[in-house]
Image: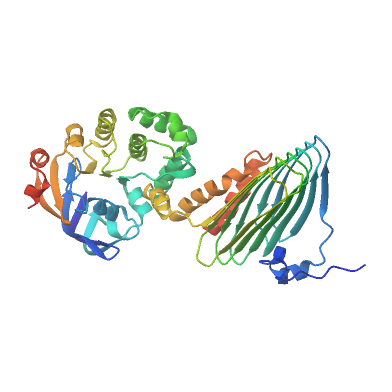
């Protein structure tokens, strides 16, 4: 059996990746495949904290729903790749946070294909990056020719804690139907200095003030997760390491 | 309590304060009035330690400590409270959580035990009641969606909870209607009019001083205090304007 060649940075999907780290992990195991039958409901939380590449293929049957919550925080290089196919009237939700410091390189790469009419997808992704860390979101939404009444949204924000951290964000739309709603928003910024000063003026030391603001920045993505408290606690602990 | 001497400060290299001196003792309420651009807000931010406000000369001591050498959170723990002219909206951060963490950070810095969740809520409810601010607003994100008056009342609730020794209130009266002005004025009196506390009110207008009677009134113009007097000075200013007095 032939193994596929290791991707290079010329491959769009691996453009910001840590190819050296990838070489050590290559060849990757086959992606995890999940099929949610018509009318089914699937919920899952994924915590990447050891420097893994996770590839998941998710197929939602007619009217099925899935809600994924992702926390990408660990290892020198961590990547979570989701390939989602939505059949008629299916609903997919992703709430993801990636938090990195030092020289970490963290990536969330999604392809959501609206294969049939009337499906909805909503992705909310928040990145917090300190040190010389790099955080990347590549998100493609593909709408097939007859997938009318598609409703998709990508809401992507990154917060840089220093001038040497990097955030990449690329929402991408490929639409072949003509009656669709595809929203995407993307913002990269830094903590608001006035708000930080306001918090400090009430007695919070600078690190605590930053942590409180960052906690608020990522908190919303875990709304509705079954293990919301655990995800919040892990995220908070990681944020505490960065400030 | 607060001793400011020959204070010079710049903002973006532009001199704003040019030799300001002022002493405030425990039990006193001082008002600083002055025209736009005189340096009133700069004074409050310099005393509060806001980044970007640079002291180039002079000194400020608070209870004998060098105030200018302290970080903003250390000034708070030492007992200084700054009421903002424009309170900041912070989406996602709940008022209650922020205030409890702030209070406990101050207590920790002073070597005191943290306040439990229950005790804190009791305190917060009492102060919110005093300022007639709905407790539900305290559970919402800091100042987000608050009206101008609600923001200012929230500042006073914060002051009540944090219980400072010295409050510097920067145009706390701006944006308040007559009823809210009375509530805020009563709040300041009830929280701060104590023998061991002091207040520095920064304002454009006489009207707040009808509710919070100052012991001393100072006129700030072009970065210096050009005139000081008793409460009658505020009425004089209201009648004749700054131009005549400051000239």
Is B119 left, or right, of A45 in this rendering?
A: left
Quadrant of the image occupied by residue A38:
top right
Color encoding of the figure = rainbow
In this rendering, does residue B174 appear at all? yes
User: Which sits in the foreground, A138 or B63?
Assistant: A138
User: Which sits in the foreground, B91 or B190?
Assistant: B91
Residue at 33 percent of width and 38 percent of height: B152
In this rendering, does residue B111 appear at all? no
Q: How many marks?
A: 0
Whole-percent x and y of residue A158?
Answer: 56, 55
Whole-percent x and y of residue B170?
Answer: 27, 45
Whole-percent x and y of residue B158?
Answer: 36, 39
Residue at 72 percent of width and 56 percent of height: A80
The residue furthest front is A178
Whole-percent x and y of residue B52?
Answer: 33, 60
Quadrant of the image occupied by residue A232:
top right
Is B168 left, or right, of B234 in this rendering?
A: right
The residue furthest right is A1
Residue at 18 percent of width and 46 percent of height: B32
Quadrant of the image occupied by residue B56:
bottom left
């Amino acid at each position: 059996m032939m193994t596929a060649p290791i991707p290079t940075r010329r491959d769009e999907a691996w453009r910001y990746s840590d190819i050296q780290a990838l070489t050590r992990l290559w060849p990757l195991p086959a992606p995890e495949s999940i099929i949610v039958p018509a009318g089914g409901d699937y919920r899952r939380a994924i915590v990447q904290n050891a420097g893994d590449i996770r590839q998941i293929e998710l197929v939602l049957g007619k009217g099925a729903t899935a809600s994924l919550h992702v926390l990408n925080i660990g290892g020198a290089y961590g990547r979570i790749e989701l390939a989602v196919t939505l059949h008629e009237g299916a609903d997919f939700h992703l709430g993801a946070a990636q938090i990195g410091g030092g020289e970490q390189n963290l990536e969330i790469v999604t392809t959501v294909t609206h294969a049939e009419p009337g499906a909805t997808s909503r992705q909310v992704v928040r990145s917090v990056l300190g040190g010389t860390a790099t955080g990347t979101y590549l998100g493609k939404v593909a709408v097939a020719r007859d997938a009318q009444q598609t409703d998709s949204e990508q809401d992507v924000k990154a917060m840089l804690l220093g001038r040497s951290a990097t955030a990449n964000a690329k929402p991408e739309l490929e639409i072949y139907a003509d009656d669709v709603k595809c929203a995407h928003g993307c913002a990269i910024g830094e903590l608001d200095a006035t708000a930080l000063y306001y918090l400090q003026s009430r007695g919070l030391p600078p690190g605590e003030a930053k942590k409180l603001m960052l906690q608020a920045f990522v908190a919303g993505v875990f709304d509705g997760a079954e293990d919301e408290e655990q995800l919040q606690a892990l995220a908070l602990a990681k944020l505490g390491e960065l400030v | 309590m607060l001793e400011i001497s020959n204070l010079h400060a710049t903002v973006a290299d532009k001199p704003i304060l040019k030799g300001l001196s002022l002493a405030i003792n425990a039990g006193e309420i001082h008002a600083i009035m002055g025209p736009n651009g005189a340096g009133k807000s700069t004074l409050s931010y310099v005393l509060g330690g806001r980044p970007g406000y640079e002291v180039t000369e002079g000194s400020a001591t608070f209870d004998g400590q060098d105030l200018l050498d302290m970080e903003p959170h250390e000034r708070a723990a030492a007992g200084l409270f700054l009421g903002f002219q424009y309170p900041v909206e912070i989406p996602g951060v709940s008022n209650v959580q922020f205030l409890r963490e702030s209070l406990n950070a101050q207590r920790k810095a002073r070597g005191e035990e943290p306040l439990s969740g229950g005790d804190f809520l009791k305190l917060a409810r009492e102060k919110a009641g005093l300022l007639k601010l709905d407790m539900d607003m305290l559970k919402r994100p800091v100042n987000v969606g608050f009206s101008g008056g609600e923001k200012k009342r929230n500042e006073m609730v914060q002051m009540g909870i944090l219980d400072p020794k010295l409050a510097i209130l920067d145009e706390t009266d701006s944006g308040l209607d007559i009823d809210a002005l009375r509530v805020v004025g009563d709040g300041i009196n009830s929280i701060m009019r104590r023998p061991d506390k002091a207040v520095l009110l920064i304002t454009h207008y006489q009207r707040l001083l009808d509710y919070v009677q100052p012991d001393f009134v100072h006129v700030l113009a072009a970065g210096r205090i050009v005139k000081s007097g008793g409460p009658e000075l505020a009425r004089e200013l209201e009648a004749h304007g700054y131009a005549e007095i400051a000239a």
